[in-house]
Structures are given as structure tokens and as C-alpha cells.
Image (cartoon, grey):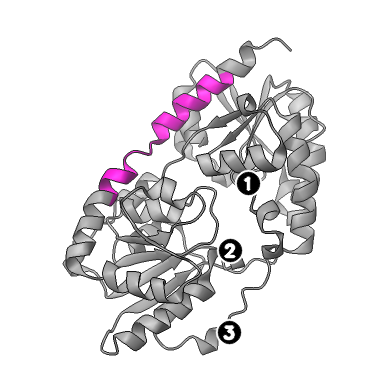
Amino acid sequence: LFRSVIEHGDRFNFILFTGDSELFAPEWQRPNVKVVTSPLSQRSVMRNYVWEQIELPRLAKRFAVDLLHSPANLAPLAFRGKSIVNIHDLCFLVQPAWFSFTFRSIYRWLVPRIAHNSSLVVTNSNYSKNDILKFLDLDVDRIRLTYWSVDPIFYEYNKPYQDREDRIIFVGSLEPRKNLLGLLKGFALFKQRHPHSKTRLTVVGCENPLFADIGINRQDVGNDVDFRGYISDRELAELFGSVRALVYPSFYEGFGFPPLEAMAAGTPVVTSRTSSLPEVVGNAALLVDPYSPEDIAEKIALALDPAVAGNLVEMGNTQVRKFSWDKVGEHMIDIYSEILAEQP
């Protein structure tokens, strides 16, 4: 997001407030970009909240910012200037049981107040926009829709389908809403129905104490499932480009990056027909009922059919190219200009 904004914002001066200067890419070094590092935000999740609500508004005042853009759901309530917040989803309100008590309590208190305190709220799907209207009681003219895109690295790894491993992949944090348990049940059913199949399932993602337990004992899932934990974007792109399909039966997504990342890597996608996912994948994926292991098993088998896979790859390549960081950058600069032109 920041890269796309600075590439289209030559007429603005940018200050990036961050807790990790290593996240700042060398190509972002420009005369109109300044980085301010605050180590306090690196120590823990709770310290992050403290930094965001206390230290960040002080920094914004110290550097006399004209507009504060907070891109990840939360923003400082004490800031009284012009501001934008990206709210990606309201899952903590829609399904609070999926989150730890601490997480949902903090978010349920902060996010509605932040939304009403901000000049504009930006979200990245019509589905999330409708949730914001429903749960936060925000005027529609204070919401802007901007679809996000994928890192270009995912286009770099794209093996021919016939050269790929007999493997499918799941990508996501190991939390209840990602529905890994449903996928494991569907995969087990697929293996029962296709006893000679050598297809393996690789699970990429880590558990997070902010979310409720997913109720899975890894020792009970069988020998055809591998858990990879966290991997870098480059490793993920390489993995996407070497497998037969992404299976992503999430219950709820405000946008959902993995399906588009898989499409960029030329990988067929199976995903849910719920929340924002049909909006994002269009007709370029096989849609499943995430509550039905039988449907998941059937769609896995269908995605592994070479003829079906070929069509999915072709449609996926067209679909993912509808999402562009250039468009995001241009739209965000327009939003900045709109807010800055308004009278205080």
C-alpha cells in the first residue's frame, strides 16, 4: 500500500511512523519520504496498542501532519486532525467467539469509535462496506471502496501444471474462521473416496493467541498432511507455483489475499461461497459450502482434474489482473486530496 501511494504522490510529503525500520524498502527512499522509528511498538501486542493510542498522536502532533492514514483497522482516538483508517473486516463483531476475550473486547470498544472519529473509512470489498454500514452505523458517504492487489512476487513462480507436485495447499493463520478443521475433514473424505491418490496437503500458517483455539491435534491428521508454519512471501510464492491447487474454505474474509496470490502463480483455487470471497474471485474459482466436508472433498477432486484445472488457471490469470496496486495508489491519492481540500 505504502509503495503504491508514494509512487503516485509526488506532490505530497510522507512520514512513515513505524516500529521496524527494516520494513522500509530501499526503493522507497525519496526526497519526499521520511521514516520515523519508534521502538516501543515492537515489544508486544499490548504495547502496540499503547504506542498507537498514546505515542502515535504525539508523533503526529510533533511533526504537524496534515492527514494521518492508519492502514490496519486501528487508529489513535486522541488524534483530532484529518484522518483515514482502513477497516478490512468486522469479523470480531460478526463472530466474536472466534477471538480471544482480550482481542474482541479491545476491538469492539475501539473500532466503532475510531470509525466515527475518522474523516473517511476505506475498505477493500463491497461485503466489508455493507458490514460497516450495518454494524458501525456510518454514513455511506464517509466510506470509500478500494480493492487491494497482490505482491508482484507471486507472478514470478509459475511452473507448468504438468510439472507440479501432487499437492494442494492451505494458507492462513490457524484460527477458527479460516476453517482448517473443515478442510482436514474434507481432505480425509477425498482420500477415502480416492484411495490410490497420492495427493498431499500442505498447511502454511501459525497459531496466534489472539484467536480462539482451532481444536486440532496435529498428530491425528494423518501422514498426508504437512504443517509448514510461517514462511516468507518469496517462499510462499515459490510454493504456490509448484502445487496443484489452493483450497481456502474460510468462513469469513473481508478480502482474502491467498486466492488472488494463487491465481497470480497460475494455481487453481477452491474457496468459499461466503463473505467477500465470491466478489474477489469472480467466476475464476470453484466455490464450496465451507460447512460441508462433502462439498470440499468433491471440489478438491474437481480442481485436480487437468481439464478443469486448465480452465481455472486461464480464468484466474484474467481475474487477478483486474486488481492493481497502481489503481490503489491513484485512488488513495485522490482520497488524500479530497480530505485535504475540505475545510476543517
Looking at the rendered image, the disc whose residue lies closer to the viewer, 3 or 1, is 3
Residue under label 1, please give it: 20
Residue visible at 51% across and 15% down?
Answer: 11
Magenta stretch: includes residue 317: yes
Marks 3 and 1 in Cβ contact (< 8 Å): no
Residue 220: x percent and y percent? 52, 89
Of badges 1 and 2, nearer the viewer stands 2
The residue tagged 2 is 177
Tell me which corner region of the image, top left, top right, bottom left or bottom right, holds residue 79.
top right
Q: Please, what secondary structure does the residue beneath circle 1 have?
A: loop
Disc 2 marks which amino acid?
Answer: Arg
Point out the stretch of residues depicted in magenta. 316-336
Name the residue located 62 percent from the left edge and 11 percent from the top edge.
Answer: 341
* Residue 185 in the image: above or below residue 57: below
Is 102 left, or right, of 176 in this rendering?
A: right
The answer to whether residue 125 shows anywhere in this view is no
**Please, is residue 127 above or below residue 329 in the view?**
below
